[in-house]
Image: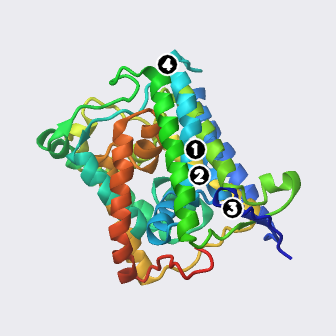
């Protein structure tokens, strides 16, 4: 019989429940371990230990995302459709922890590899506004954001393969059009709350913590008034066994993701990002088909098109996320790809194209622009969040056209 302990307040509700879990899929686990080891050896041999470390961080990110089913797309959709704030609350905790660590790292210049750490601080212009809005629509049609696409592909979601392919294509198209959006469209300079305002990292950290706390408090007040359906608790087990076999609490995963993003900054010299890897993959595919991708402004002065993909830190982390999610799903016994309905397939392709194109315009996705951008004290990260939320609202009216359901206030869970 399932057992769970639910507190009386919204901010104390459990996102996991102790219940019977599926048997471990041992053949998949063995296959995943072998693949992970082979890829690690290949990365270290071709690109060195730093890239190998980034790959391991990617494995950990994939595990954390899958074990908690940590969502950005679902968090935005639940909030806008029925007022469920559990996902946004987890985001605020994640951003608070990441901002704290980023403030220390960026202000001291600490690095494990000698690379000077630099945050994701980018200009605010029409490209960010349009790109984030498109991404918000796209992630609701594709049923996953950038990180969601990767961990769901690893976790066995068949439709997300279509989303990923379209995501890559959209990223390449965005790179082709990048000159127009960057040079011909109006834009304001990049604004760092730490370096552009005179606040410094300590002052900017205080301001952002206050904003996170305010949003969290408003979430609690809003949810108590609206009383929306809760997220369905994920099945887990007890003791240390839950680390590899059961689901992780949402807040626990939020802290792990923040720690891993900070570790990425100290190893790579830049925060966690995803979609630049997709653009590179799309560029290499087009180049293999004879397209003169090297003449595009996006790739000008870069040797990535001619270098091994294993030399690209973002790519090896993406590979790690997919494999980490695969291993975690196999350990949970949940890796079960299924058939794809025509409507879902259409939405996946359109959503992937919109996300890829939008991410390229907006200097990143839910990770590179929203998570890492805000943690880097960049104002463009906040603009991205607002526009993606507006895109989510519009997407709620589009999703039913493809047979996709939205949460309802009358649902018992969402």
Q: Position of residue 331 (x, y in %)?
A: 75, 60
- Dot 4: what SS? helix
- Dot 2: what SS? helix
Numbered disc in front, either 2 or 3: 2
Going from the N terminus, do you reach mark 2 or mark 4 first? 2
What's the CA distance linking mark 1 and mark 3?
A: 23 Å
As drawn, is 138 to the left or to the right of 6? left
Q: Nearer the viewer, residue 136 or 279?
A: 136
What's the CA distance linking mark 2 and mark 4?
A: 26 Å
The dot on residue 329 is 3
What's the CA distance linking mark 4 and mark 1?
A: 20 Å
What's the CA distance linking mark 1 and mark 2?
A: 6 Å
Mark 2 neighbour class, 10 Å CA radius: few under 14, some 14 to 19, many 20 or more:
many
Q: Position of residue 312 (x, y in %)?
A: 46, 36
Which quarter shows the C terminus?
bottom right
Q: Residue at x 54, y 47 (%)?
A: 92
What's the CA distance linking mark 2 and mark 3?
A: 22 Å
CB under 8 Å between callouts 1 and 2?
A: yes
Mark 3 neighbour class, 10 Å CA radius: few under 14, some 14 to 19, many 20 or more:
many
Q: Position of residue 260 (x, y in %)?
A: 61, 38
Residue 151 in sight: no
Mark 4 neighbour class, 10 Å CA radius: few under 14, some 14 to 19, many 20 or more:
some
Q: Position of residue 364 (x, y in %)?
A: 37, 45
Q: Residue at x 56, y 62 (%)?
A: 152
- Dot 3: what SS? helix
Going from the N terminus, do you reach mark 3 or mark 4 first? 4
Q: On the image, numbered disc 2 is attached to which residue?
A: 90
């Amino acid at each position: 019989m399932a057992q769970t302990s639910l507190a009386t307040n919204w901010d104390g509700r459990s996102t996991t429940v102790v219940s019977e879990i599926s048997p471990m899929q041992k053949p998949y686990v063995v296959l995943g371990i072998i693949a992970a080891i082979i890829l690690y050896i290949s990365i270290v041999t071709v690109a060195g230990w730093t890239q190998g470390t980034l790959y391991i961080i990617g494995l950990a990110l994939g595990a954390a995302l899958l074990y908690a089913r940590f969502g950005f797309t679902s968090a935005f959709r639940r909030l806008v459709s029925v007022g469920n704030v559990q996902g946004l609350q987890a985001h605020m905790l994640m951003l608070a922890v990441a901002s704290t660590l980023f403030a220390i790292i960026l202000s001291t210049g600490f690095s494990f590899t000698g690379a000077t750490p630099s945050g994701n601080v980018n200009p605010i212009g029409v490209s960010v506004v349009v790109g984030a809005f498109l991404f918000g629509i796209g992630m609701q049609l594709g049923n996953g954001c950038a990180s969601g696409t990767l961990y769901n592909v690893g976790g066995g979601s068949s439709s997300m393969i279509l989303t990923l392919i379209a995501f890559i294509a959209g990223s390449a198209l965005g790179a082709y059009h990048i000159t127009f959006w960057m040079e011909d469209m109006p834009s304001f300079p990049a604004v760092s709350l730490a370096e552009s305002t005179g606040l410094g990292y300590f002052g900017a950290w205080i301001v952002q913590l206050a904003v996170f706390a305010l949003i969290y408090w408003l979430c609690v007040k809003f949810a108590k008034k609206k009383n929306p359906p809760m997220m369905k608790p994920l099945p887990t087990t007890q003791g240390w066994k839950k680390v590899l076999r059961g689901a992780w609490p949402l807040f626990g995963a939020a802290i792990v993701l923040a720690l891993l993003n900070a570790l990425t900054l100290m190893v790579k010299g830049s925060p966690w990002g995803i979609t630049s890897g997709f653009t590179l993959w799309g560029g290499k595919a087009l180049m293999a088909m004879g397209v003169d991708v090297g003449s595009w402004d996006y790739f000008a002065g870069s040797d990535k098109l001619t270098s091994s993909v294993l030399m690209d830190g973002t790519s090896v982390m993406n590979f790690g996320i997919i494999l980490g999610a695969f291993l975690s799903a196999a350990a949970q016994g949940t890796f079960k790809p299924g058939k794809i309905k025509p409507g879902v397939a259409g939405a996946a392709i359109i959503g992937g194209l919109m996300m890829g194109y939008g991410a390229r315009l907006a200097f990143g996705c839910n990770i590179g622009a929203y998570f890492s951008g805000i943690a880097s004290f960049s104002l463009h990260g906040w603009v991205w969040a607002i526009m993606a939320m507006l895109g989510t609202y519009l997407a709620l009216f589009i999703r039913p056209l493809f047979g996709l359901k939205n949460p309802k206030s009358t649902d018992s869970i969402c």
